[in-house]
Image (tube, grey):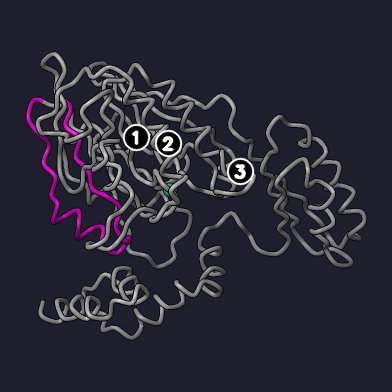
Amino acid sequence: MKVSIISDTHFGFKWGEERGEDPFENAKEAFERTKDSDLIILPGDIFDKKIPKQEVLDKASEVFTIAMEGDRTVEADRDLGMHGEGIPLASIHGTHERRPRSYTNPIELMAKTGHLHHIDNDCTVFEKDGEKVAVHGMSGVPERYAPKVLEKFDPQPKEDAFNILVIHQSVEGFVYTDDNHEYLSLEDFPEGFDLIINGHIHWYNLERFPGDKPFILPGSTVTTQMNKVEAEKDKGFLTLDTEEEELDFHSLENPRDVEYIEIDVDNDPWEEVKQEAVEELEKLASREKKPLVNLKIRGETEGRVNPRELKQMFRDRMFLNVNSSIDTSGVGEKASIQERTDPWQKGKKILSEKIDSELEIEQDEFLQLLTDGKPDEAESVLKEAVDE
Ligand SMILES: [Mn+2]
């Protein structure tokens, strides 16, 4: 069976801005180039926001339609509802789409309207000419719950099938920094799967396939963060031939380039440093699509670094990010900056400090209910936790 994997398309990312079309353009190419698939797997973060704008849903449905116009060559072991035509899109929802239980997330909505098939802590078996592919899906959950949710889900490989487990989490060894999170680790995954696909992490990595724990990262189709690891790897999608056990990465033909420049300085005057930066930046300034450029100035300069001056100079030719003091290669540090400024994160932190650590409540859900003006429902979540 020919299975394609398209992950983290992030529809709605930078919506309304110059880069707002990037997620759609990139995903369209991936969908067009996988029209000969029997099955397409979407490992989450298909949308960038849990409540996408109508225009984003509208444009996303156009992308899904590309697959729905393909040939249905497989049969499923369950009723796929309105998603009855074309190449089945087997999707989990990611951390960006996740909403509390009583709310509808965009993947659920798209499943109800027949645009895709949602697999949530469940398994659907697809069959073509006697060959079976079992897709087991665990949607994204807050990291610290992931080991428990996976244990409870306890997916078991189906006999006589090619078994694929699809998740959307941080996994130890595949995240930038250790910021005291409890992550899933490779040992947590059950044995016997032919392939474990993890969305969420935006650069591809196929090194562990084949193997005992064939854990792979398809990466995203669009750049959402300017960090070094992401800059070094292409954006694209995967194709899998389940009979030949062949897995291939395909680079997108025309994505926006990401460049990372580092300049080391040792108390040099800013004017000199600027000159060097301009020379480097000029080399990247005539691309068809304005590239994303991360300029890092390492060390002290004599006189103040003036990033605005550089940004202004290149504003029509690139998206420039100048970094002179904070290392953006580590997400941990980024997260700590966010923590200081994002009221949602701040609220969550206070909440988690105040709530007894023994209480197993989903703080995202609890906070969402409170901010949505539903204190009664929030209270019942809390009561449920106390009763347990
Ligand atoms: Mn993502």
Does 305 appear above or below 20?
below
| Horizontal side, residue 67 vs residue 118: left or right | right
Q: Which residue extends farthest left? A: 159
* Residue 325 in picture, x, y percent from top left: 70, 64
User: Which element is circle 1 on?
Assistant: loop
Q: Residues within 10 Å of mark 2 (few under 14, many from 20)?
A: some
The residues colored magenta run: 133-160
Q: Give the numbered dot on residue 208.
A: 1
Q: CA distance from mark 3 to mark 2?
A: 26 Å
* Residue 337 in picture, x, y percent from top left: 57, 69
Quarter of the figure with the C terminus: bottom left
Q: For the residue marked with disc 3, what is the amino acid?
A: Arg
| First of labels 3, 1 by sequence position | 3
Q: CA distance from mark 3 to mark 1?
A: 33 Å
* Residue 319 in picture, x, y percent from top left: 70, 46
Q: Which residue extends farthest top? A: 129
Q: For the residues carrying marks 2 and 1, which lies nearer the camera in this image?
A: 2
Residue 142 lies within the magenta run: yes
User: Which element is circle 3 on?
Assistant: loop
Residue 152 lies within the magenta run: yes
Q: For the residue marked with disc 2, what is the amino acid?
A: Asn
Q: For the residue marked with disc 1, what is the amino acid?
A: Arg
| Horizontal side, residue 202 vs residue 356: left or right | right
- Residue drawn at (29%, 47%) of the image: 109
User: Which element is circle 2 on?
Assistant: loop
| Horizontal side, residue 102 vs residue 296: left or right | left
Q: Give the numbered dot on residue 19.
A: 3
